[in-house]
Structure formats: C-alpha cells, structure tokens
C-alpha cells in the first residue's frame, strides 16, 4: 500500500476517464462522417481513430449494430498500418455488414456485392475486395460477389479476393490469401488458403 500503489490507481482512474472521452469523440466524428457519406450505421458502434467511409452515388453501405472499428496504429496491439477504409467503388455496389463485427485497419473495397454476417472478426490489416479495381486494364478479372458468414475470424494481414464464400465459424490463418470458397467450420491457411482442419462447433 505504498505511494506506487496510490499513483498506479490514480493513473488507472485518469486513463479510464481519458478513454471515455476518446470513445465519445471518435464516435461523434465517425457517425458524422457516416451520415455525410450516407452510410446506414447501426447503433452502438465503437471507434478508435477515423474510419474512412467513401460511398459512391447509387451504391449502398449498411453496417449493423455494435460493430467496432480500430483505425490508429496502436488501437490494436498487433499494430495497424492504415485506418479502416470502407468503400464502394462502383455504382450499384452493395456492401452489407452484420452486427457485432470487428475491424482493425481493415480495408473493404466493394465493386459489386460484399456481405459479412454477424460477429465477423477481421484481424489487423485485413483486406476484402470483390474487384480487382483497375477495370480499365485488360488484365483485371470480372467483379464477383464475396460472402463471409457469421462468426468467421480472419487473422492478421488476410486478403480475401473476389468471388469467395467463407462458411460460418471458419478461421483463416495469418497472412493467408483466400482465392476459393472455404466451407463452414474450417481452419484454412496459406496462399492460396487451403483447409487444414475441421472444427467441431457446438451449435
Ligand atoms: C491458423 C491458426 C489459428 C492455427 O493455429 P493452431 O490451430 O494452433 O495450429 P498450428 O499452429 O498447430 O498449425 C497447424 C499447421 O498449420 C500451419 N500454419 C498455421 N498457421 C499458418 C499460417 N497462418 N499460414 C501458413 N501455415 C500455417 C503450421 O505450420 C502447421 O503446419 P504443419 O501441420 O505442417 O506443422 C494460427 O496459426 C493463426 O494463424 N492464427 C491467427 C492469429 C491472428 O492473426 N490473430 C489476429 C491478430 S489481430
């Protein structure tokens, strides 16, 4: 019960108060930005740092309740290279994110259709796209929809490319590149990601 104990407690108390202000500040900034871009945001979403929303006219972005967006370098202690960027790149693109999802420096680029279920965890610096983006270049493939079902966990630096469907509860290992469908309840790793394990999931 010395002075160090007293100072530690004081520091904890002060940092808790600062965190509360920080959350409130980023919530106000990010909800205002979502409103500006006409992104349909659910209730109770939490933010650290500024998420970049960019919605092209005539496209659609819907985000469910209680999602969390980490967008500063240290808001996820794996270390983030960039803020979250949530964007529709083409007219009539449809990006739908379910409830309770988490994003850490995640970039989502939607040219056609990307659907995330509920409680999808996207690890540090993950990237999800249904488009090769450079549509003026003959080497780019066609846009193809991406579906990521409930409770999927993408490890850090995972890349999910166009046309992929990941079944519920699956886990994609760190640094993997997902180019083909992954069935539900699987652990998949590598580039291209291959299933190495099937999980026993209690429903
Ligand atoms: C996929 C993962 C969960 C597997 O963990 P595990 O069930 O304990 O499995 P193991 O470590 O025993 O690995 C099983 C095999 O897969 C390989 N492997 C594991 N993760 C791999 C990866 N990301 N890429 C390539 N191969 C991988 C291992 O080398 C091992 O191969 P082997 O059977 O030939 O020896 C884990 O390695 C992983 O990538 N976790 C993600 C962590 C993360 O990104 N967290 C988010 C931070 S923001």
Image (tube, rainbow, N blue to C red):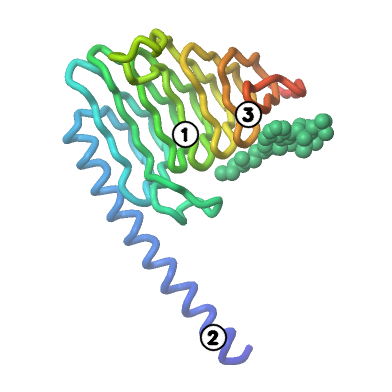
Quadrant where the C terminus is found in the figure: top right
Q: CA distance from mark 1 to mark 2?
A: 37 Å
Q: What residue is rendered at 39% in x and 52% in y?
A: 72
Q: Is residue 115 left or right of residue 184?
A: left
Disc 1 crowd rating (10 Å Cα; few below 14, some 14-19, many 20+) is: many
Ligand 1 falls in which quarter? top right
Q: Residue furthest bottom?
A: 3
Residue 37, position in %: x, y? 19, 31
Kindly check if marks 1 and 2 are in contact, taking CB atoms under 8 A apart as contact: no
Disc marking residue 6: 2
The answer to whether residue 75 is visible is yes
Kindly check if marks 3 and 1 are in contact, taking CB atoms under 8 A apart as contact: no
Say which quarter of the image contains residue 132.
top left
Say which quarter of the image contains residue 107.
top left
Residue 109, position in %: x, y? 36, 25
In front of the other: 203 or 109: 109
Say which quarter of the image contains residue 53.
top left
Q: What residue is rendered at 46% in x and 22% in y?
A: 116
Question: Which is closer to the viewer, label 3 or label 1?
Answer: 3
Circle 3 is placed at which residue position? 172
* First along the sequence among labels 3 and 2: 2
Question: Which is closer to the viewer, label 3 or label 2?
Answer: 3
* First along the sequence among labels 1 and 2: 2
Q: CA distance from mark 3 to mark 1?
A: 19 Å
Kindly check if marks 3 and 2 are in contact, taking CB atoms under 8 A apart as contact: no
The answer to whether residue 200 is visible is no
Circle 1 is placed at which residue position? 100
Q: Is mark 3 within 8 Å of ligand 1?
A: yes
Residue 124, position in %: x, y? 51, 42
Q: What residue is rendered at 43% in x and 66% in y?
A: 16
Disc marking residue 140: none
Label 2: which secondary element: helix
């Amino acid at each position: 019960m010395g002075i160090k104990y007293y100072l530690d407690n004081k520091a904890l108390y002060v940092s808790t108060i600062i965190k509360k202000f920080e959350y409130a500040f980023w919530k106000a900034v990010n909800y205002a930005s979502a409103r500006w871009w006409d992104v349909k945001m659910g209730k109770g979403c939490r933010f650290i740092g500024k998420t970049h929303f960019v919605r092209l006219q005539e496209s659609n972005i819907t985000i469910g309740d209680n999602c969390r967006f980490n967008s500063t370098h240290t808001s996820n202690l794996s270390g983030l290279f960039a803020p979250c960027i949530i964007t529709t790149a083409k007219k009539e693109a449809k990006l739908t994110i379910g409830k309770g999802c988490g994003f850490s420096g995640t970039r989502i680029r939607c040219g056609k259709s990307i659907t995330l279920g509920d409680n999808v965890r996207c690890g540090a610096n993950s990237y999800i796209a249904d488009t090769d983006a450079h549509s003026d270049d003959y080497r780019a493939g066609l846009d193809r929809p991406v579906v990521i079902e409930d409770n999927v966990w993408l490890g850090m630096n995972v890349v999910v490319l166009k046309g992929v469907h990941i079944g519920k509860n699956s886990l994609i290992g760190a640094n993997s590149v997902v180019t083909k469908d992954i069935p539900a309840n699987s652990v998949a790793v590598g580039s291209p990601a291959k299933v190495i394990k099937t999980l026993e999931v209690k429903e």
